[in-house]
Image (spheres, rainbow, N blue to C red):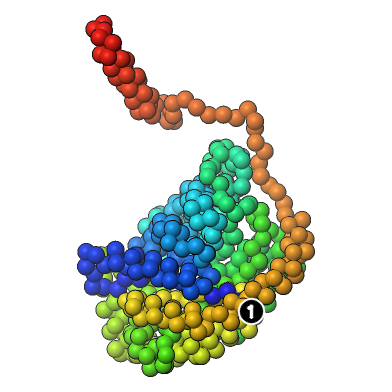
Amino acid sequence: MRISLFLELPLPRPWTDTSEQQLFRESLDLVELADKAGIHAVWITEHHFLEEYCHSAAPEVFLGAASQRTERIRLGHGIMHLLPLINHPARVAERVSTLDLVSNGRVEFGTGESSTVGELEGFQVDAGDKRIMWEEAVRVATRCMTETPFTGHSGKYVTMPPRNVIPKPVQRPHPPVWVACTRHDTVRMAAARGIGALSFSFVSPEDMAGRVSEYYSILENDCVPFLDTVNANTLAIGGEMPLMCADTEEKAVSSLGIGGGFFSFGIMYYYKFGQHYPGRTDLWSTYAEAVRKDPSVGYGPNRGPVGTPQQVRDWCRRYEESGVDEVMFLINPGSHDATMESLELFGKEVLPEFLERDEKAAEAKARRMEPIIEKLMARRDHDTPPFDPEYHFGGVPTGLSGARADEALIAIQEMTEAHEREARRLSGRTD
């Protein structure tokens, strides 16, 4: 089993003018340490307008910075919104490919739809259409990465003429594709389409075992690959509490503070019961008051990866025994120094045995899956539209009203005239 980190970049109030800058700087320091410790991947989400809960609105920029401070760690979108009104598929392909290039092929391409009122209404997305939008957009985005040229698409939500979308990624045909699975049904859908199941459900390791078994059963028996390659992997979020490893249980609990439940509380607030006033709601104060009334809100009965190296090791082993391919742990808000110490201790005392076992398991899995994936890819229906070799474009853009976007044409003419005047001046001519 691979072990990774999951970053939401929470920023509880109160804020100062430098709070966000400090958050990003410390988070990059954490990723650099994770790389040195041997952590498999860092996954970072994309959310918009969800104050305090998540300030990661441009994960590709953060991951680009992280790529230049690390050497081995995988860089995961967990997830990028694949709704055309938020991220156009061609722009998705360009950004993912660029990140893959600057990181030397370390991208994990997690995709999803979003489920919050703040985001969907903010971008004028019809909530009833978001799954269909995702299906169309992920197919177009991956085609943009693989086709030279992209042969065009005319769909319900995306219409685009042929273009050679550049750059192309290092990983061919494209980086591994995952889909966010908050519901059991989505895990089944991921298996049926040959996509990695990026599970964000807070279920026990034992419950996860059933989902893993069902995923691989559906994959082998019923899968018709959706894309140009199969990503046969399952990933689980490793509990509701952030990772906090310390020499003693008391120190781990103390280092966690009351912030351990903030992620779960933020989910419930933005996805269920919250009535948010943009720029005015103090979510941390609301959370702290809830913890005061009921301490289990901040530190529930299912502690998860909090405690001594042996306690955290036992927790990880339960996920390993579930058969999940990868587990990722949350990071606690507002405890940077303690988190860095925790990660260093985890990397030294807990991680090595899992790395050793995973290397052997990964080799065995690759041998086992090779003939299965070959069989699955033979089922795939290639529906790419043909490319007209005579197709071309050029000239001045003209709108439906007949208006011409001729700014560049005018600028070129002005530059040409300026060059001619300069040439006359240098030659001493006055005509």
Q: Does 245 appear above or below 158?
A: below
Q: Does 198 appear above or below 164?
A: below
Residue at the far top: name it: 431
Q: Is residue 423 left or right of residue 238?
A: left
Can I make out residue 191 in this image?
Answer: yes
Query: Residue 205's x, y, as percent?
Result: 57, 83
The residue lying toward the viewer, choosing from 288 and 305, is 305
Query: Residue 109's x, y, as percent?
Result: 54, 59
Q: Which residue corresponds to the image point at 50% horizontal and 84% vertical from the top-left? A: 349
Q: Is residue 170 left or right of residue 293?
A: right
Q: Does 76 appear above or below 357?
A: above
Query: Residue 372's x, y, as percent?
Result: 76, 65
Residue beneath label 1, please? Answer: 357
The image quarter containing residue 324 is: bottom right
Q: Which residue corresponds to the image point at 29% horizontal and 83% vertical from the top-left? A: 288
**Secondary structure state at the residue bearing disc 1:** helix
Query: Residue 223's x, y, as percent?
Result: 71, 63
Q: Which residue corresponds to the image point at 50% horizontal and 62% vertical from the top-left? A: 71
The residue lying toward the viewer, choosing from 426 and 408, is 426
Q: Is residue 196 left or right of residue 248?
A: right
Which image quadrant: the C terminus?
Answer: top left
Q: Which residue corresponds to the image point at 44% horizontal and 58% vertical from the top-left? A: 68
